[in-house]
Amino acid sequence: MQYSIKDVFAPKLFSTLKKYNKAQLGQDALAGIIVGIVAIPLAIAFGISSGVGPTEGLVTAIIAGLLIAVLGGSKVQIGGPTGAFIVIIYGIIQQYGLSGLMIATVMAGILLLLMGFAHLGSVIKFVPYPVIVGFTAGIALTIFSTQMNDFFGLGLTDIPANFVDKWIYYAQHFDVNWWALGVGLFSLLICIFMPKLTKRIPGSLAAIVFATLAVWLLKRFAPEAWGVGSLVTISDLYELPHGIPAPHVPSLELAEGDSFFTLIQKLFPSAFTIAMLGAIESLLSAMVADGVIGDKHNSNTELIAQGVANIVVPFFGGIPATGAIARTMTNINNGGRTPVAGIIHAVVLLLVLLFLGQLVGMIPMACLAAVLIMVAYSMSGWKTIVGLIKHPTRDLWVLLITFLLTVIFDLTVAIEVGILLALVLFLMRTNEQTHIRTFNKEIDPNEDSDIQLNLEHLAIPDGVEVYEIDGPYFFGIANRFDDVMSHVSGEKCPIRIIRMRKVPFVDSTAMHNLSTLIERSHREGMTIILSGVQTHVLHQLQTYGIEQMMNPENICSNIHEALKRAEALLNK
């Protein structure tokens, strides 16, 4: 298949600007402002929960959001930090520090670039749905567990990263700050009920505004009353700079005996996980958006844009970024139809970082915890999981195993094992769909027809056996076919016809086994006749050299010719 440069990299911004007008600018501006406001609490919350800080979350949303809008293959994609990355980022920082996170993110960006240039945009879409649901639900539960410290105001430090150890640590130090819990519950209720009152104002934004205002009033007018001072806000834990940090390369602290190349090797699994998550989430978001606006995104361009964003962002202290489904849908619902809306969203976030840093610092940590609990609930997809219970048991097992591996171990293991399990199940299903039949006396040509043709049965001469492979002829079937050929009859028939009219493809194992069968048949004085081989399959057999091993007359276009050829050989 031939590809042009436009198939690989064709940003939607440049094609949409050709027909741009003032009316669309007005719609994009409104959508961009609203999405920017919606992104403020999420960017801050994701930054803090990832183990970095609010500034890093905002910087990621600004730079990545701008680059993905300008270079992306979707008209309406909104990029930035997402909840899916929290678990993997936190684990990398715990083990390798911020410099390790930077290297892993840049590596992930390079992998995304390579995926895009290698035309793998469409291949990523084939990641099995149970795997996606399983690790997304696992991430949701993990995010939920990380918010208990701030939601209940436990004030704990050095919390274990492991899920089980984390909950044991919580149980051992469960000393509730009732003010924090009150703010958390107040924020949670606003997040839940605001969408029922109006769709225009996001629940997370309303919760942050009201909770921050309430805490500010309490601290302003009753600072010593009832322990209000124990409420922790962002400014109590983080220093918010005014503006985008200057690009820098953090100092690299290597463990004793480690080299930079060794660190790269250690970080590669994490980088691969970030790249896979970024690719899957961004392309899923783009696909959902396509269905709503009636457009078609360029998946390879989208991967390249994600790659560029993840290469650039770490040098400003940012964290991994991808397309965000919720923010993308907010953009669409408010009239955004071109990448200009994504650019305006990034400008809004930049203005917040430049001029509203003090206000951001007043946000209570318990309120952010409530916002992330709602994010975790939305990610959990519990309704989808309940629906999958009605699906094949194997799919449910893949989902559950991926979910448990995500929670108990880590996302890297979960994705690798989940995809491996899904691949094994796919091969098992394909194996089950391929049938091998044996004919000794006659063949009924009416058997495979949708209508009764009343064709005469084809008689099979004595000394001839007919085998039919119905389905893909690959390594799983090849070994089964060998067993059938070895045990189907006690006596060796001098001629065996292999009917391959329903074989859509063959793999190297099948061709190897077939060549071995032909060689063995020659030694034992038997003849193999191939019948009804499809053109592209025959070309593969020719390439492998199987045609040269046989008499060309023993490769027949249909079963009638094959039976006539068998009779001719028997009568010699």
Image: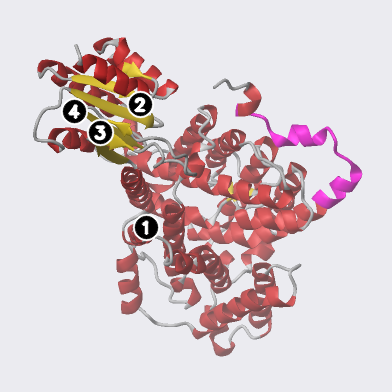
Distance Cα–Cα, label 1 vs label 3 = 36 Å
User: With 539 as the anchor, is 523 left or right in this view?
Assistant: left
The x, y position of residue 547, in whole percent, is: 30, 13
Q: Earlier in the sequence, mark 4 or mark 3?
A: 4
Quadrant holding the C terminus? top left
Can residue 240 be seen from the camera position used here? no
Distance Cα–Cα, label 2 vs label 3 = 21 Å
- Residue highlighted by disc 4: 462
Quadrant of residue 437 within the rendered picture = top left
Q: Secondary structure at mark 2?
A: helix
Q: Earlier in the sequence, mark 4 or mark 1?
A: 1
Q: Secondary structure at mark 1?
A: helix
Nearest the viewer among 483 and 248 is 483
- Residue highlighted by disc 1: 406
| Magenta span includes 473 | no
Residues marked 4 and 3 touching at CB (< 8 Å): no
Q: Earlier in the sequence, mark 2 or mark 4?
A: 4
Distance Cα–Cα, label 2 vs label 4 = 16 Å
How many numbered marks appear?
4
Q: Earlier in the sequence, mark 2 or mark 1?
A: 1
Q: Amino acid at mark 1?
A: Thr
| Magenta span includes 16 | yes
Q: Secondary structure at mark 4?
A: loop
Within 10 Å of disc 4 (Cα), the crowding (few <14, some 14-19, many 20+) is few
Chain part drawn in magenta:
8-28
Disc assigned to residue 559: 2
Which dot, 1 or 3, sits closer to the camera?
3
Residues marked 2 and 1 touching at CB (< 8 Å): no
Residues marked 1 and 3 touching at CB (< 8 Å): no
Distance Cα–Cα, label 4 vs label 3 = 26 Å
